[in-house]
Image (cartoon, grey):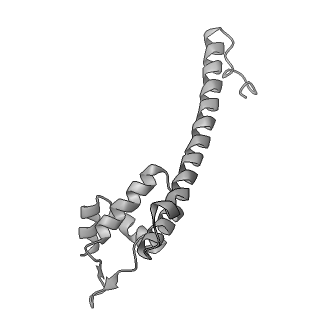
Amino acid sequence: MKIGEVARSAGVTVDTVRFYERRGVLPAAARRPSGYREFPRTAADRIRSAKALQDLGFTLDEVVDALQAHDTGDATCESERWRLEAVVARLDERIARLQRVRADAAACLDDCRAGSCRLVGAGQLG
């Protein structure tokens, strides 16, 4: 498949396909004599899998590692569970941080409603 066909099939841009190839999500494509990349039919599925992992919260490096583990045939639920545990822990940390920020913003809003807005005046924020 040409790069544009892969991109359309996977629902991404051509630049995303190139980026994924550079980062190791996709193996390096074979080249036609004309220089055009020739991807296997499985490339679009692999991109969709990578995007699904990223949507779960995997970093791109984690996606590459998980796909490589799958490629070697070593990936099992037992061997890969730690990856999801790390993602969940990271998401829990992010949620806790957002809850703290939200509480601070809500307190600032309450102050504004009470007539003592922290947003007005130099050095008032924080």
* Residue found 30% across the figure and 65% down from its top: 45
* Residue found 45% across the figure and 50% down from its top: 56
Q: Is residue 63 left or right of residue 32?
A: right
Give residue 63's position: percent from left, percent from top.
47, 63
Number of labels in the image equals 0
Furthest residue to the top? 114
Give residue 88's position: percent from left, percent from top.
54, 47
Furthest residue to the bottom? 33
Q: Is 79 placed above or below 120 here?
A: below
Give residue 22's position: percent from left, percent from top.
45, 74
Q: Work out which quarter of the rendered image holds the N terminus and state it.
A: bottom left
* Residue found 51% across the figure and 57% down from its top: 81
* Residue found 69% across the figure and 20% down from its top: 118
Name the foreground residue: 13 vs 26.
26
Q: Is 7 placed above or below 115 here?
A: below
Name the foreground residue: 126 vs 87.
87
Residue 99 image-quadrant placement: top right
